[in-house]
Amino acid sequence: MMASSYNAKEEDGQLSGAAGSGGVGAGKSKKPDNTAFKQQRLPAWQPILTAGTVLPAFFVIGLIFIPIGIGLFVTSNNIKEFEIDYTGIDPASPCYNCSQTLTWNSTKPCVCKIPFTLEQSFESDVFMYYGLSNFYQNHRRYVKSRDDSQLNGDASSLTSPSKECEPYRTSDNKPIAPCGAIANSLFNDTLTLYYINPNGTESLVPLQKKGIAWWTDKNVKFRNPGGNNFNLTAVFQGTSKPVNWQKPVYELDTDPENNGFINEDFIVWMRTAALPTFRKLYRLIEKKNNMIPTLQRGNYTLDITYTHFPIQCSDYPVRRFDGRKRMILSTISWMGGKNPFLGIAYITVGSVCFFLGVVLLIIHQKYGNRNNSAEIPN
Amino acid sequence: MAPEFGESGEVKSYKLKKRRKKQSKKDIKTRTVHSNLLYSCAKGDENPNRHYAHNNIKTTKYTLLSFLPKNLFEQFHRFANVYFVFIALLNFVPIVNAFQPELALAPVVFILSVTALKDLWEDYRRHRSDKEINHMDCLVYCRNERKFLEKYWKEIQVGDFIRLRCNEIIPADVLLLSSSDPDGLCHIETATLDGETNLKQRQVVRSFSELDCVFDPTQYKAVIECEKPNNDLNRFRGYMIQRSGRRDGLHKENLLLRGCTIRNTEEAVGIVIYAGHETKAMLNNNGPRYKRSKLERQMNVHVFWCVIILVVMCLFAAIGHGLWVWQYGEHRPLFDVPSPEGPALSPALSAVYLFLTMIIIFQVYFIHQDLDLYDEETDSHLQCRALNITEDLGQMQYIFSDKTGTLTENKMVFRRCTVMGEEYSHDANARRLATYQEADSEEEECTSKAGTLPRRDSVTSHQSVKVMHRSQSTKSHRRTGSRAEAKRASILSKHTAFSSPMEKDITPDPKLFDKVNECASQLYLMRSQGQPMNHLASELSDVIDFFIALTICNTVVVSSPNQPRHKVRVRLELKSPVKTIEDFIRRFTPSRLTGSNSSSSSSLVTNRSTHKTCSSLLSSPSAESTLMGLEEELGPAPRREAGPASPPGGDGELRYEAESPDEAALVYAARAYNCALVGRLPEQVTVELPHLGKLTFELLHTLGFDATRKRMSVVVRHPLTGEIVVYTKGADSAIMDLTRHGSTDENRGKHQRKILNKTQNYLNLYAADGLRTLCIAKRVLSKEEYACWLKSHLEAESAIQSREQLLFESALRLEKNLHLLGATGIEDRLQDGVPEAIAALRKAGLQVWVLTGDKQETAINIAYSCKLLDHEEEIITLNAETPEACAVLLDESIHYIQSKFVNNTLNPAAEDFEVDFTPFQIPSSSSVHRLGLVIDGRTLAYALDKRLEDKFLAVARSCRSVLCCRSTPLQKSMVVKLVRNKLKVMTLAIGDGANDVSMIQIADVGVGISGQEGMQAVMASDFAVPRFQYLEKLLLVHGHWCYSRLANMILYFFYKNAMFVAILFWFQFYCGFSGSAMMDQWYLIFFNLMFSSFPQLVTGILDRDVSSETLLALPELYRNGQDSEEYKPHMFWMNMIDAFYQSLVCFFIPYFAYADSDVDLFTWGTPVTTLALFTILMHLGIETKTWTWLNWASIVFSLALFFTVALCYNASCPTCYPPSNPYWTMQRLMGDPMFYLLCALTPVVALLPRYLHRVFQGTLFPTQVQQGRQLDELPSLKRSNILRQRSTTVDSPFGPRPSFHLFPEPFPMDYGYRATESHSRQLREASRDCNQPGNGSAAQGDGQDREREASTSRSDPPGESQEEDPFPIPKSHRASDANTLPYSEALRAAVDSESSFCEDGYRLDPIGDSESSFCEDGFRLDPIGDLNLLNWITSAALFNQPGSAVQAESLQSMLQTAEKEDGSPSPTSTRPHSDLEVVQNQQLVNPVSSEVKAAVPDCLQEGALETTLL
C-alpha cells in the first residue's frame, strides 16, 4: 500500500536547505522550541498522597465541619414545625367520610374539621404547606406533560397546545388550557385555619395567598394570554378546562392578579416536586405585630374543603396510590425548613475526618519514617 | 509459464485487485511487453501494453465519494460508536426518547466527525506523498523527439524506455538493456528493498550485452514474455523473443527493481516491465494492519461491560416500572400519564473514544515537540503516524530490531590493526573518532559563518590534522559524528556509494607509519641499487605486503569525485585475465616480468584497438546508426581513459567505490599509510607507494568472496619481485586454519607460531570490542605451483557441470599454506547511544531481538558491540541444514536449558538477595537466562514451521537475547507474528529499510528510522524516529507517560460515566422507574463534553507520574506498563464500585437534605449535577499527579463554565427547553446557603474512601512508580545522587543481584569463546557455580553500603582516577563506550609477557580468579579441560580478572573499614571523602595483592601487580 520509493526529492530539499543555512537558519529548522510547555517541564506541584502529607487536610476538614454541623443542627432544631395528616384513612378521623368515595355527596362540598393544638407559639412568619406523599410528580411522562409557552400566554399555544400534553391536550375538540397532566392533577383541597380563642370562639387565621410562588414564575414564566386584558373569560374563549377541574382556569380566583395562569397555587403546583414525598407552599401567615406571636399556643381547627373531583368522584384522590395528605405549619430559617440531616452529616463527617487524621498520624509515626528511610538510602 | 504467481493473494491494493480481475478474465498467464515505440500512440488500441498498470501509484484509502461510507464503516468497528449511534437513533422513536432527538445526536455526530476529519487528514497526507512520488522526474525515450525527455514517474508506462543515471531511483521495474559499464553491468543499491547496503550487480540482457554501440530504443523490436506481477523480489523469469525468433532467457539479474538506486553506473537504459502497483516493491508492501492498542482492546471489553451494566440498569428500571405500575392495579394514579411507556433510561455514557483521541493527539503533539527526540543531523524529529496506539509504547515487551542502519550507522571505520603479531592501536585514530563530533560542529560553524557551503572535497587531510590537534583537549566524548558530518556524508552519498569523511580520514599510527616508510625507502633503495627485491627483511616486507594486500585484495573501483565515474571501456578478449596455458606462457615471458608504470598505458592502447563493432544482434541494424554509435564510442574515448590511467590531482580527490563498505574502509586505511590505490582495471591494479611511486600489479585472478570460504583472494604478480603472490583476506576463523604451521626452518616456525598466537589474541580482543576482524595473509607461489594450479583452475572454469563446486575446490587449493600478515579491526560504527539504549531497554524488562539480513559473523560482532550479547553469555547457535536437524537442535537446546537452569533458579543464595534488595530491583523472571541464541535464516525457516515453532519459541524465550541472521523480510515478519501471537506479548519492530516494512506492519507498534535508507519504513511505521537511541526515551518516558495517562484516563472515563449514570439510576427508585431525570437534559449531554472534560483533557495530556529523568534513570519503572499495572480488570471493577459509592453519596446527601421539602425536580437536580461535577473534578484532582497552572486553570475554567452556562441557560428563555424549563433555577440556588453547604459536604464524603485508599496504599505499600515519584520530590541534588547510585548499582557486579541472569557487568572472560560458538554447548558450569556463591556472600553484607562504596569509587572523575584510582582496568572497561580499547602501553607489554609465559599451559578460569576471593576455596584452577588452549590464553581476560578481584576484595574490606568508621555514612561524594576512600583503596591493594600472590601463578601475578599499581 505504501509508496514504494523513497522520496529523494524531499530529502534533497531538506538537506540542501539545511546545508545552505548552515544551521543558522533556525527559522527553517524543525527543531522544537525549548519551552517548558512543549518539553513538558511546566513547573508543577506534585502532591504525594502519604499519611504525612494528607494529615493536615483531615484535621482541617474535621475542625471546619464540626462547628458548621453544630451550627446547622442548632438552627434546624430552632425551627418550629407542626404537621397534621388529614388523609382520613383511619375511620376515626374526621376526614374519613369525605375521603370515602361512596359517601361522597356530589352536590355539596365536603368539609372536615380537624382540631389540633400548638404546644409552642410560632414567633416568626409561618409557612403553611400541604404535603403529599407517594405522589410521583417526578414521573417522566408527568413532568413532560405541560406546555410552557401556553402557560406563558402564547396565543397559538393556547389554541393548539404542545403534543407533550397528550392525552390531556384537548377535550371535546377544544384545546385544554392549561393542558397536560400536571395541570390536570392540580391539588384542589382548600385549607383554612381557625384559632380557637381561649373563650371558645373561632377566629380565622389570616392566610396570605400571594407571595408563595417564585417571583420569576409569577412575573416571567406564567402569563395570561391576551396581555393586559383582564377579561380572562374572553381570553380563554374556545378552550376547555382540564378534565379533572371543576372550574375553568379563569375562575381560580377572583383577584385578577391571581387568576388564570398566574394563580399562585397553580404556579406552585406546576413546579413539579423532585421526590415522591413533598410539600408545597400553600399560604403564608405573616407576623403582624412584634409583640404577638404569629401563631399563639393553643387550639386550632383546620378546615378542609374538598372540591369535587369529577372523573374520580372523590376528594383529591391520594388513597388509591397509598398517598398521604398533610398540612404543615413551619417557620423557616436561613437554611430553609426543618431538616437536621445536614447538621448531623456535617458533624459526623467532621468527626470521621478528625478520627482518620489521628489514625493517619499514628500510621505516619509508625510507618512513614521507616518507609522513607528504606527507599532512599542516605 | 508461472501460472500461480500473480494470483498469490498478496495483492493489497484494491485498485490492483480490480485490475487483476479484468485481466484474469482474459486468463493470460504471462505478460507480454512490447516496445511502446512500435505503436504510434502509447494509448492506442493496438498497443498490447495498454492493459497494464500505469506507474501512477495511489495509496490513499478513500476517494472523495467513498470517504463517507467507508469511514463510517470503519468507525463503527468501535463498539461504543455503534452503541452511541444506536442510543441516539433510539431517541427518534417517540415512545422511548429521553432527549430531544437532535440534541442526543449532537455528541455522536461530533465524535464521528472529529474522527473522520482525522482520517481525512491522514489520507490527505498519504495522497500528498503519493503525489510527490508520482511527480518525480525520469528520462523517458520519446518517439517523436527521438531522445530521452524528462517525464514524471506517473507518466511512465509499461513498454517505455527509460534512461537512468547514477544515483537515480528506479521508478519502475525495468529490464536492463544497456549500461554504460563496459561489462554490461549496472550496480544498484537495494537497501530500500532488502536492507543490504552492498551494491548488487545487474546484468544487461544477454543478447544486448554483446552489443558495443549505444543502445538505440528505436531499433528495439523484441517482445518480452515474462511472468505476471508477483511479490517475489528474488525471482524473475521470462524470455525475450527477438525479431529473428531467437529466445533469450531473462532472470532476476536483468531486472532493476523499483525503489532501488543506481550506483556506480553512469547510465543505464531499460524497458519498463512492471509499473506502479504491479512492481515488486509495491506488491511486497502489505497493507497496514489496522492496529488497535492493547489498552483499547482492554477498554473495548470494559465498554462492553459498561453497556451490560447499563442494560441491566435499564432492565431493572423496566421491571421496576412494570411492578410500580402493577401495584396500582386498575386504578391509574393522578400522576400517571396513560401512554405507552418504554424503559429508556437515558444513558449518558460518554464519548470515551473522542476524549481518548483528543488526549492522544495532544500526546502526539508533545512527543513531536520533545527536544530529546530531535535529531539535529537530519533536522527531523519523531513522527507519530498512527494516532491510536501511543499508549502501546508503554506496554512493550519485545523489541525486534533491524541491524543495519538501525543499530549501526552502516559506516565502516578502520580502527586498528596488527601486523606480524605487533599491535598498532591507532590511538590517535580512536581519538579522532571520539572527538569527531566536536571538530565537525566547530568546523561547520566556521564555514557557516563564512557563508560558504561546507567544503565537500577538501576536508580530508586538513581535517585530520585539526582533529589531532583537538584531541589533546579532553572534551566530551561522544561516539559518533555530528550533524555536519552526517550532512556531508549524505551529500556525498549522492555521488558515491560509501564514503564519509569519518571513514576516509584515518589517522595513521605513527609507529606503523614509520615502519612503512622505512620499508618503502629500503625497497626503493634496493630497487635503485638493482638488488633483488625478495631479500628484504621479512618483517619489513610483511609490513609492506600487508598494505599492498589491503590495497589490492578487493574489488574497489577508483573514481574521481568531480566528474562522474567513467570506466574505461576496455573490452578484453578474455574475461578472466589468464585463460589458457598458452596465454600464461605468452604473458609470462621474461620481457613482461618487469612491471612498470608504462605497462598500464601500453596495454590500454593495445586493448583499445580491439574495439569491436556493433554486432548485428539488433534485428535490423541500420548502418547509419551503427556508425553513429561508433562515433559516439570513439569520440569521448580518450577522455574517458584519462580517468584511471592518470589519476587526477592529489589523493584527496580519489574516491573509492566498493561493493561493501568495509572494503572501502580498508582501502582508505591503506591510503592513510600512503599506500593508495590509484587505479583498477580488469587486468591490473595500480598502487602508489611511498618512495616507490606507482606500481602496477598485474591482476591474474580474483577469487571473489563467498560465504562458505569466508575469504577472498587475488592472485597478482608483484611488480618488484616478479613473484606470483596470492593475497587473501578473510574471516579470522577461515584464515587462521589455513596458515602455514609446519615450517622447514625450526626457528622461523616457532616465530610464526608466536605471531599466530599473538595475532589470535589481538583478534579476540578486537572481537570483544565489537570490531569486525579480518585476517590478511599472503602466499607466494612458485611458477610451477601456479602453473599447476592454473591448469586445474581453468578446467574448473570451463567445466559445465558442477562448475561452482569445482571453482570452490580450486580456490581451496590455492588458499592454503598462507603466511599470515596481520589482521585488521574495522568498526561497524554503532549509532549513537545504541548500547546504552539497549541496556536501558533491557533493564526495563524488554526483550531485544535483532533480526538482520546480514551475515552471521557480522551480526554477532555487532551484537557484542552493542551489548546485546555478552561475553559471558553462552550462545546457542542454531545452524541446521535440514528441518530434522533443526528439530534435533531445538530439542537439545531445550533439554540443555532445562538441565542447566532449573536447579540454578532454585539457588537459595540467589533468593537471598531478592529478599533484601530494595524495591527497584529487577524482578527475576526465571524463564530468561544468560543465554544468547543465534539462528540463521535457513534454520529460522525450519524453526518457523508449524511443528517446530513452539520449540523454537521455548528456546528463544529462555534466552536473553536472540539474533536472527540472514533472515528475509518475510521471515522477520513471521518471527514477529509468531512471538506476538503465541506469547501474547506486545511487540515493537524497529527498522529503517524496506526490508523491515512487513515486520513493522505486523508488530503491535512499528517504528521506522527516518532519514537513513529511504522512506519506506517510515511510511509503513507507526512512529518514525531519527535514531535508534531515541527509542529509549520514546518507550521509557513517552511510552510510560502515554500509557499511564491513558490508562488513568480510561479508568477515569469509566468512573465518570458510571458515576453519572448511577446517580440517574438511583433516582429511578424515586420516580417510579419512569426513566425520569432530575438533571436538565442539556446538563446531561454536555456534562461530559464540556463541563467535566477540560481538566480531564489537561490531566490526560500533561500528567506525568514520574519525571522523565527518573524514568530514564530507573528503566525498571517501565515494567509498570508491561504488566498493565495501571489498568487491570480488577481496577476497572474497583473503579466501578467506587463510582457507585460516589453516586450514592451524591444522590442521597441532597436527597436527605431536601427530603420532604418544597423543592422542585430541577431545583433539586441542579445541585445534584453540581455536586457530581465537583466530585468528579476532585476525583480527578486525586488522580492528578502533577499540578501545573494549566490543571488549576482548567478546573477553574470548568467550574466557571458550568456556572456561566447554567446561569445563562437558566436566564435565557422562560418558556423553552421543555420539560425542565429551568428558568432562574440556578440563580435561586446561588442565593441558597444550602446549596453551598451541600457542595462542601458531598465531595468530601464521596471521595473519602478513595482518598484514604490512596493514602494508605501510598504510605504502606508504595508501588515502584510511587517511589519514583518520591524521588522526584527530593531536591535535585539529592535525587541525582540517589539515581546515580542506583544506576551504578545496577551495573555493578558487586551490588546485590536478584539472580544470576541479570549480571550486566561483563567479565571479559571469554574472548575465545566466540571462535567456538558453533559448538558452544561446552559450557562453563564450574565458573558459574563459583560465581554465584561469590555474589551471594558479597551480598550478604549491608548491600547499600557496598553500593555506595562502589559508586563513589566509580564516580571519580577520570582525570584523577588515572593517577589515583588503583583499578584502572575495570574502570576503563566499564567505560565501554569509550573509543579506545582499554589497553595502555603497559597493558600491551603485560599481554606480551604474559602470553609468552603462559604459553606452556597455565589455564586459569578467569571467573574463578575474579571471584575466588569470595569463594571459600580460594583460587581455583579451571576444572574444564576440554577448552582450547588458544582460547584460554586470552591475556586481557587474565589480566583483567585479578584487577577486578582486587577491586572486589578491597571494596569488601573497605566496607568494613567504612562501617567501623561511621555508622551513618552520608551519600555525598564530595571530594575529600572520596579522596579518603581512594587512599584507603591504595592501602588495601597491598594485602590484597599479596593474597593474590599466594594463589596465582607467577606470570599472572606479575600482570596483576602491574595493573593494580598503575
Image (cartoon, rainbow, N blue to C red):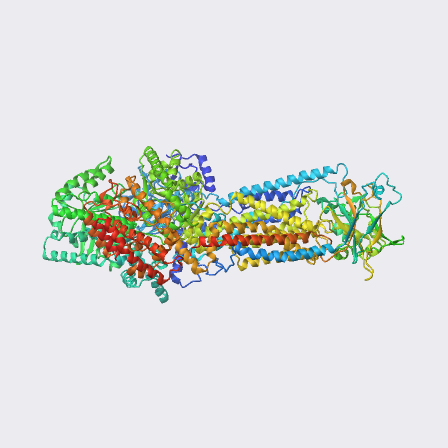
- B1179 relative position to B766: left or right: right
Q: Nearer the viewer, residue B1134 or B1059?
A: B1134
Q: Position of residue B244 (x, y in %)?
A: 31, 38
Q: Position of residue B1041 (x, y in %)?
A: 48, 52
Quarter of the image for residue B1326 reads: top left
Quarter of the image for residue B1281 reads: bottom left
Q: Can residue A200 be seen here?
A: yes
- B694 relative position to B1297: left or right: left
Q: Please determine whether, in this image, residue A336 is positioned above or below residue B300.
A: below
Q: Please determine whether, in this image, residue A289 is positioned above or below residue B352.
A: below
Quarter of the image for residue B1071 reads: top right
The quadrant the C terminus of chain B occupies is bottom left
Q: Can residue B699 be seen here?
A: no
Q: Please determine whether, in this image, residue B139 is positioned above or below residue A101.
A: below
Q: Position of residue B1460 (x, y in %)?
A: 36, 56
The quadrant the N terminus of chain B occupies is top left
Q: Nearer the viewer, residue B962 or B1236?
A: B1236
Residue at the far front in the pictured view: B1460
Q: Nearer the viewer, residue A72 or A38?
A: A72
Q: Position of residue B1350 (x, y in %)?
A: 35, 54
Q: How many marks?
A: 0
Residue at the far bottom in the pictured view: B450
